[in-house]
Amino acid sequence: MKLAGLASAVLALSLAAPTVVAQTPAAGAPPAPAASPPAGNPVDPASIQALKDMGTYLQTLTRFRTSTSLMGERVLADGQKLLHSASATVDVQRPNKLRAHMWSARSEREIIYGGGTATLYYPAQKYYSSVEFSGSNAELVSELEKRYGVEIPLADLFLWGTPAAPVDKIESAMNAGQDLIGNDLCDHYAFRQGDFDWQIWIASGAMPLPRKLVVTNRADDARPQSVTSMDWNLKPAFNDATFRFTPPKGATKIQIVPTKTN
């Protein structure tokens, strides 16, 4: 699980200056009681299985749009916390088409990938950079971060359900009951992994979509959190033109610089 990236993605977007259908509960129905982890074993196998089932289902989706609302905490030197927000939409057509639009009060950018070229575009400045690439969406997400330090929101959507997202590193797993996220009844799970505690709300029923994710950084004494809410459209109206970038009038092409570690 790429939890470090999830925990920092909100702040990376909201603070950075530009550089380059689920089931609903019956009326009045009480939430199902939470299941406690087995005695002597902090990892509840059923919670791990729920995570695997969600990943397997996500890998079956060939076309989708997810709209996200992100909130993240930044901790000042004196311990005071500041809360910042950002939003994103991600259009996906497997195996190799993706368009992500990320914006906040401080920054806006788009990533467009149509199976041969990946483009990073800043609408306010009309700057764009393009690199040749021919891999899958999951490979693109990995390479953009590794080569250029560019993160795509909710990159884990491309990893869950694959060998790149092993669950054997999870140190604690529990079922925390059920909650409503929007109109969806969701199963709430809590996990501990390395320096991060994370919670996920997965829609109950035949379409186990992740609807909310909370990550807490325990490596920081202030325990900053990031919160991501996700809405889904499994029948999006986009077409192939969505994944083609045509430079608008007045746009300037610039070179994207690899990170110093490469």
Image (tube, grey):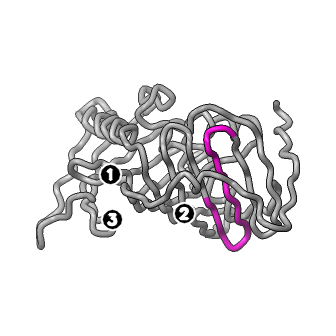
Find numbered disc 1 in the image and state the secondary structure of the residue it sits on.
strand
Residues under labels 2 and 1: Cα distance? 17 Å
**Along the polypeptide, which appears first: circle 2 or circle 1?**
2
| Image position of 171 (left or right of 6) | left
Report which residue position mark 3 lands on: 181
Kindly identify the residue that appears in the image at 64 percent across and 67 percent down: 81
User: Which three-letter amino acid code belongs to the residue tagged 2?
Assistant: Leu
User: Which quadrant of the view contains residue 235?
Assistant: bottom left
Check residue 102 for magenta coloring: yes
Q: Are marks 2 and 1 in contact (CB under 8 Å)?
A: no
- Residue type of the residue flagged with mark 3: Ile
Q: Nearer the viewer, residue 205 or 134?
A: 134
Q: For the residue carrying disc 1, how many other residues have a C-alpha within 10 Å: few (<14), some (14-19), or many (20+)?
A: many
> Residue, x 16% and y 56% (percent of image)?
32
Residue 213, percent from left and from top: 44, 54
For disc 2, the marked residue is: 70
Asked which quadrant contains residue 253, the reply is: bottom right
Apparent side of residue 40 relative to residue 135 in the rendered image (left or right): left
In the rendered structure, which segment of residues is drawn in magenta? 101-116
